[in-house]
Amino acid sequence: MTLLVKNIGTLAGIDEDGLTRRQGAQMRQLNCIDQAWVLVEDGVIIDFGEEDDIILLEDDTMIVVDAEGGMVLPSWCDSHTHIVYAGSREQEFVDKINGLSYAEIARRGGGILNSADRLHAMSEDELYEQAMHRVREVIAKGTGAIEIKSGYGLNTEDELKMLRVIRRIQQNTRLRVVSTFLGAHAVGRAYAGRQADYVDMLINEMLPAVAQEHLADYVDVFCDEGFFTPEETGRILEKALDYGMRGKIHGQELADSGGVEVAVKHCALSVDHLESMTDRDIELLRGSETMPTALPGTSFFLNMPFAPARKMIEAGLGVAIASDYNPGSTPSGDMKFAVSLACIKMRLQPAEAINAATINSAYAMGISDSYGSIAKGKVANFFITEPLPSVDFIPYAYTTPIIRRTFLAGEEF
């Protein structure tokens, strides 16, 4: 099937240099063509250019889409979500309003353990139907690639249940889905007071079971104060590599707890959160393959400090942005809002924030060779906006719906 999108007001997010990520000053480069077209064949972008030469392309065999002067951007790539979960946690939202901290709610049996209890009682089919509702929501908001983590099972059976649901989502949608095993999200209730035993069980029982069914692309660990230590994190990541699963880290969210150091030491693909990041962490990330990933929606919802993304970019690092969509700390998968928060609260330029939410977030999932920008040979995941005055309008109008049509692998959603 050949698809031609014409009459594009601005085609943004173009990459003709084969970059897999943008770092430092490169993040301000959002390459655009005004009055443009895009040509797609069998779900892949094969060409694009200025409107003047479109007459050489159009023929009766094509599906032709008129962008009507709207912009075309690469779909958002959301590299950190927990959208497979059982029900909402609005009571904890009220607890936060009443002054309880994230840690205090967790100590009272809420938080991650609350979600684990609910997930245990829910069937795989029910879990899948709930998750698919969220999947359709984020696609409509412009997301075309997403990482989904387990981590609300906290025992082997329930972690596998979550990962099987993620696999069903992979199989039943054109959304690009990356799966991450997060058994080290918290210590399961059955192991209360026995964290070392839980880590041993995760390494010796959970990881082999996940690997046997080929259910995860990556392995994540919550390396932070009150959760898993750098030493425990290192053990888990080393064993995961034996099964061909690279690490990703939840780190430096609640305290300066060594998350960045262990991520760099073990060549983790990304280290996410970073609300408590230090200058030393920034130096550790220089020259590494690890993508620092900010989750501004979490800081907004929990009234926490924001990750120092401006400082990271000025130090020459790349930065990714993701939603952290989950029931406790960020019940939103709206990547446009995350981009706006990155500009408003982290002082990113609009171009930097858009690159952070597209090519760099694709890098943080290991898929930026095929997603995250408008480039020949990449998968045709993009959205068409209403006519807009400029790219800067996208984060500026932080609640305005701008998307008119979305396309995944060249097919309209």
Image: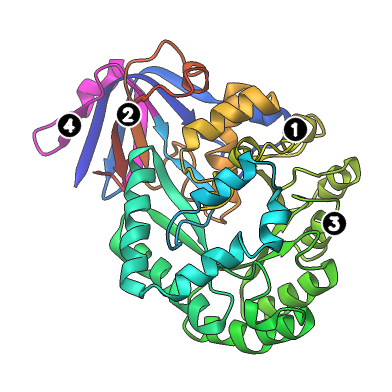
Of the residues shown, which amino acid type is indicated by label 3? Answer: Ser
Disc nearer the start of the sequence (1/3) = 3
- Tag 3: Cα neighbours inside 10 Å, few (<14), some, or many (≥20)? many
Question: Percent position (x, y) of residue 411?
Answer: 24, 45
In primary-sequence order, the first of circles 2 and 4 is 4
- Element type at marker 4? strand
Label number found at residue 294: none
Disc 3 versus disc 4: nearer the observer: 3
Kindly report the distance in space between the C-alpha atoms of the residues bearing marks 3 and 4.
53 Å
Calculate the distance from the C-alpha at mark 1 to the C-alpha at mark 2. Answer: 29 Å
Name the quadrant of the C terminus. top left
- Residue at 47%, 16% in the rendered image: 393
Q: Earlier in the sequence, mark 3 or mark 4?
A: 4
**Residue 103, position in %: x, y?**
73, 55
- Which kind of residue does numbered mark 1 sit on? Ile
Residue corresponding to mark 2: 384
At label 2, counting other C-alpha atoms closer than 10 Å, the crowd grade (few under 14, some 14-19, many 20 or more) is many
Indicate the amino acid at tag 4: Val
Residue 368 shows in the view: no
Q: Is residue 243 visible?
A: yes
Query: In terms of image quadrants, where is residue 166?
Result: bottom left
Q: Residue at x 61, y 61 (%)?
A: 110
**The magenta stretch spans which residues?**
44-72
Q: Quadrant of residue 342?
A: top right
Q: Residues within 10 Å of mark 1 (few under 14, many from 20)?
A: many
Residue picked out by circle 3: 257
Report the residue marked by disc 4.
64
